[in-house]
Image (spheres, rainbow, N blue to C red):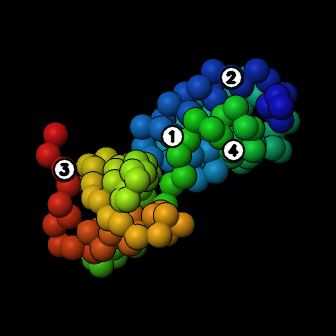
Amino acid sequence: MPSTLPYNSWDMHRRFIDWAKQHGHNPATGADTFVRLQSDFDMDQAARGLRLPPEVDARAALRQDLAALAKLSDVAVQFPPIYVHTGGDGSIYRYSLMLVIAEDCVEWIGRVWRELDYQGILTGRGHGPRANYTRLARMAIEHELDQESPGYAKA
C-alpha cells in the first residue's frame, strides 16, 4: 500500500522506522512523538514536499501517514510488540519482549525505554504452562520496573 500522502514519502518512512526501532516504538505508538520532535523548519520543508493545501495541517497529515505504516505487513513484521507499564514511581516505561522457549521453561529478554531514553535489558526465566509464558515474563518485568532501582543486565 503506497503512502496516502501526495508525495514520495519513503525517505521520511525510513527515517521514522529507524527512529522508532531505536526508541522502542512501533509505527502506531511512535508517529505522534516523532512528528512532535520535528522542527518547524523540517515541517515547512515537508509541507512543501507534500504539496498540501495551506489549510491542511502538515503535522497531522504526516502523523496519519506514519501511523498507517503499522497496517502494512512488510513494515509491521519489523517491530516486536511494545508493552507499556507505569512504574511504582509513576514513570511510564515501554518494553519489547523476546521469549526463548525450552522444553520445560522459558527465558526472556525485555528491552526497556522511558520516554526516549533506553534504560537497559531485563532478563529472567521461569516455568509453567506454555500458554502463560508471555504473561509470566511480563509480570516479572513489570515487577522489576516497580522497584526503586530495576536490575538491568550488565553489558
Q: Which residue is mark 3?
A: 153
Q: Name the residue rendered at 27%, 50% in the picture.
A: 121
Asked which quadrant contains residue 41, the reply is: top right
Asked whether the beta carbons under mark 4 and mark 1 sit within 8 Å of each other, the answer is no
Q: Name the residue rendered at 36%, 66% in the picture.
A: 127
Judge whether 136 appears above or below 29 on screen: below
Disc ID at residue 70: 4
At label 4, the amino acid type is Ala
Q: CA distance from mark 4 to mark 2?
A: 14 Å
Mark 4 or mark 3, which has the lower sequence index?
4
* Disc 4 element: helix
* Disc 1 element: helix
Q: Name the residue rendered at 59%, 25% in the picture.
A: 14
Does residue 112 show up? no
At label 3, the amino acid type is Ala
Q: Position of residue 67 (x, y in %)?
A: 68, 46
Judge whether 108 appears above or below 2 on screen: below
* Disc 3 element: loop
